[in-house]
Image (tube, rainbow, N blue to C red):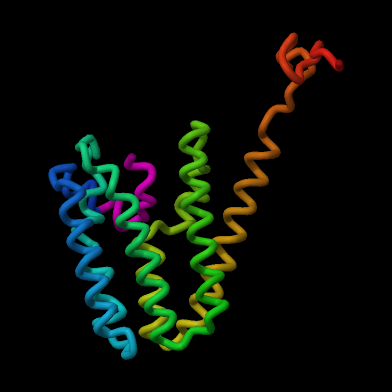
Amino acid sequence: MRFLRDDGHLGRALGRLAGGALPPLPPALTAALATAVLLAVGLGEVSGITLFAPVALLLPAAAASGHPHGGRFDRAVPPLLRGTEYLYLLALGIGAGVPGPLVFVLLTVVVLHHCDTVCRTHRGTGRSGRTARALLGWDGRMLLVAAGGALGWLPFTYGALAVCLAVLLVADSVREWANTPVARPADVPRNERGGAQASTT
């Protein structure tokens, strides 16, 4: 469950400082609701508070990354964090006048990254440590976008982040595909539907 959180460097560091004492669901839920209200109020006016307040509100949720996430409702935490990131990227991009296709591309790449993370969990495989660190985590991506907006480089930040994430995901998928052993004929199930000795009638 903690693997699905997609925490970045800051989130993991805060989790180590908290020592797993902070329950993950309450801060994630509170931050998601507060971020939604804040972005709705400041959607048409991109300012310092609109840029950085959502990230600050999520810091307690990041500090809960060290918790075991063994509670009954803790499985709701990753969707809450992801939904907050999507909302932030969408609202900030629209409010700052970032071209719609660029906002869509960045959101699509982030969603694909999260889908790939879930698929890897089911397959029992993980990313290389270098790639996982380069993807920045939800906290790192939100901070990077906020900094780009503060500097007036938001369209460039959206485009550069989308390209970097896409390159990392494709390269990691190619690496995993290249390292996957090819099944030999002896490994194919026999006497089964579609197997090596399946009937052709």
- Measured along the vertical axis of the image, is residue 106 above or below residue 25? below
Magenta-drawn stretch contains 11: yes
- What stretch of residues is rendered in magenta? 1-13
Image quadrant containing the C terminus: top right
Residue 93 position within the rendered picture, expressed as x and y whole percent measured from the top left: 43, 80
Expressed as whole percent of the image width and height from the top left, the position of residue 156 reads 52, 81
Observer-nearest of 149 and 129: 149
Which quadrant, please, contains the N terminus?
top left
Residue 170 placement, left or right of 98: right
- Give the dominant element type of the magenta stretch: helix, strand or loop: helix
Looking at the image, residue 87 sits to the left or right of residue 42; the answer is right
Q: Position of residue 84 (x, y in %)?
A: 32, 64
The residue furthest left is 21
Residue at the image point whose x is 31% and y is 58% from the top: 10
- Who's the residue at 76% across and 17% down the image? 195
Q: How many marks?
A: 0
